[in-house]
Amino acid sequence: MIRYLLLGIVQGLTEFLPISSSGHLVLAEQLLKIDPPGVLLEAVLHLGTLLAVLFVFRKDVLRLTLGLAKTQERNELGRLVVGTLPIAILGFLLREWIEAAFSCVLLVGICLIITGGILLLADRASRSAHRDEVHLHDSLLIGLAQAGALLPGISRSGATIATGMLAGIQGRVAARFSFLLSIPAIIGGGGFKLYEALREPTAYKSEWGGLLLGALVAAFVGALAIKGLLAIIARGKLKTFGFYCLALGLAALIYTNAV
């Protein structure tokens, strides 16, 4: 049970803080020799983080769901659809290449450094980012940034929020759009992994109590991480995560040169 508890905590934190959950997963497997969680557990943990987003942004989700007849809500849903298209298309077309990337520590290190650099640029841009609305072309740019997070080491939340801020959007507005945009991405990614896992006969022999614990912990920690990140963005402190990603990326590069 302790393994499920720890993995739930790690998933909840790294999924939403701009430090790349996939990058940490690869480094934990390759550098620390930690066994991967497995497809079923990974799927359940992702669905746990989905609960976190739905809980924190429940008012927005309810408003968008019930307000389809209103122009404002339809327009916002349209922007979310446009923002989702890049990750859906590229995720499908480049699936095998992306899966292969998860075995390359060098690539993870490079991507973490890219994430760190983007976060530092966004931190500087936050002083002049005053726009309080996401336009259609913004949603496409943010969607492309989210697709970049298919690579291990590129933080989904970091890339999308930073792209919004670099486009002149206020941090809190960019963050809200980023987290709403994560809902279809998590449903798609987590749902596909769950489908793959349940096709295996051995999947049903897993400890369902542990899986439930991991999902609930990921949901609880994820909700705290989202609220914490929103507070950090309000204070303009993204550079802390930027320096962290730079340091971790450099450590990964040093490791690959040493072995």
Image (cartoon, grey):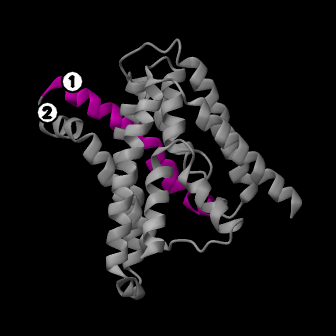
Query: Is residue 25 covered in magenta?
Result: no
Q: What number is the disc on residue 67?
A: 2
Say which element carries label 2. loop
Q: Which amino acid, by three-letter code, is at mark 1?
A: Gln
- What quarter of the picture does the N terminus occupy? bottom left
Q: Residue 113: horizontal and vertical position, in percent?
A: 70, 41
The residue range painted magenta reads 70-99
Q: Is residue 34 above or below residue 145?
A: below
Looking at the picture, which amino acid does disc 2 mark?
Gly
CB atoms of marks 1 and 2 within 8 Å: yes
Q: How many marks?
A: 2
Q: Position of residue 72 (x, y in %)?
A: 21, 24
Q: Which mark is residue 26?
A: none
Q: Is residue 54 above or below residue 197?
A: above
> In this orientation, which residue lies closer to the viewer: 224 or 250?
224
State the image quarter where residue 123 is shown: top right
Q: Please indicate whether residue 137 sits to the left or right of residue 93 in the image.
A: left
On screen, residue 237 versus residue 221, left or right, reads right
Q: In this picture, is 177 found above or below 199?
A: above
Residue 38: percent from left, percent from top: 50, 74
Which residue is identified by label 1? Answer: 72
- Considering the numbered disc 1 on the image, is that residue within a helix, a strand or a loop? helix
**Label 1: how many residues lie within 10 Å, few (<14), some (14-19) or many (20+)?**
few
Q: CA distance from mark 1 to mark 2?
A: 8 Å
